[in-house]
């Protein structure tokens, strides 16, 4: 495996390559993602999550996530079918040089990653399931404007939450709901 190469260094042009940091694996990675997305049409519910692929070598974009089992590695943003777990598309996070859809360059990394992955499914009746790392009122608004449903958990410190969202004290079994347009935010106490 030491001498396995997927790209020809003599023909590499840094100016025309989409992400020079990934040039060694780009041909295989790109072909795999193209094949994954072309051979299977996912069901209605799509899940967005991050994954940390264990890597012990030297890379400038290795991430440290203390709560993951493999704490050091290459971070991936993954779009999968919620029911089967079939991976439809993936983005390798390489820091500032990560390739995202240009339409969303003014947003944060999490919104850019979700919108880049979900782009082919916008307006087609799909539903995105996201955890609190990704979900925000901003992302929910963009998805709803594109006729795509979304649900998941939400961090209480996200921008654009209703003013009273964090101030309400709930007793066991109580639920509080806030609505703005088509976005509903709920808070409950178990």
Image (cartoon, rainbow, N blue to C red):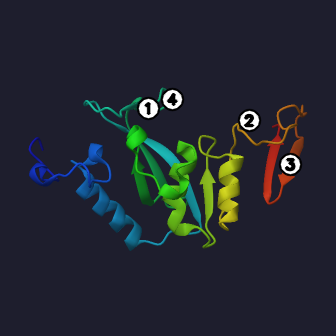
- Picture quarter containing residue 90? bottom left
Q: Residue furthest top?
A: 66
N-terminal label among 1 and 2? 1
- Where residue 15 appears, as percent x and y from the top left, is 26, 51
N-terminal label among 1 and 3? 1
Residue under numbered circle 4:
67
Q: Disc 3 to disc 2, how far (Cα)? A: 13 Å
Q: Can you tell which mark lies on residue 156?
A: 2
Q: For the residue labelled by badge 3, is the local secondary structure a helix, a strand or a loop?
A: strand
Q: Residue at x 83, y 54 (%)?
A: 180
- Where residue 174 appears, as percent x and y from the top left, is 90, 41
Q: Can you tell which mark lies on residue 178?
A: 3
Q: Can you tell which mark lies on residue 158?
A: none
- Picture quarter containing residue 46? bottom right
Q: Disc 2 to disc 4, how far (Cα)? A: 20 Å
Q: Residue at x 70, y 62 (%)?
A: 144
Question: On the rendered structure, is 58 left or right of 45?
Answer: left
Q: For the residue labelled by badge 4, is the local secondary structure a helix, a strand or a loop?
A: loop
Q: Residue at x 65, y 66 (%)?
A: 146
Do the residues under discs 1 and 2 have CB atoms within 8 angstroms?
Answer: no
Choose between 108 and 92: the one closer to the eye.
Answer: 108
Q: Disc 1 to disc 2, how far (Cα)? A: 25 Å
- Where residue 8 appears, as percent x and y from the top left, is 12, 53
């Amino acid at each position: 495996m030491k001498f396995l190469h997927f790209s020809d260094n003599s023909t590499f042009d840094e100016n025309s390559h989409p992400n020079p940091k990934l040039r060694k694996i780009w041909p295989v990675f790109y072909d795999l993602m193209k094949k994954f997305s072309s051979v299977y049409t996912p069901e209605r519910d799509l899940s967005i999550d991050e994954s940390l692929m264990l890597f012990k070598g030297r890379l400038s974009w290795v991430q440290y996530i203390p709560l993951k089992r493999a704490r050091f590695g290459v971070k991936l943003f993954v779009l999968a079918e919620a029911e089967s777990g079939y991976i439809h598309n993936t983005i390798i996070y390489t820091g500032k040089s990560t390739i995202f859809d240009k339409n969303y360059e003014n947003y944060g990394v999490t919104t850019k990653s979700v919108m880049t992955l979900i782009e082919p499914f916008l307006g087609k009746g799909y539903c995105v399931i996201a955890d609190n790392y990704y979900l925000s009122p901003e992302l929910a608004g963009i998805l709803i404007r594109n006729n795509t449903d979304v649900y998941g958990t939400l961090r209480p410190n996200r921008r654009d939450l209703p003013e009273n969202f964090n101030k309400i004290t709930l007793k066991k079994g109580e639920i509080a709901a806030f609505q703005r347009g088509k976005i509903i935010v709920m808070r409950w106490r178990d």
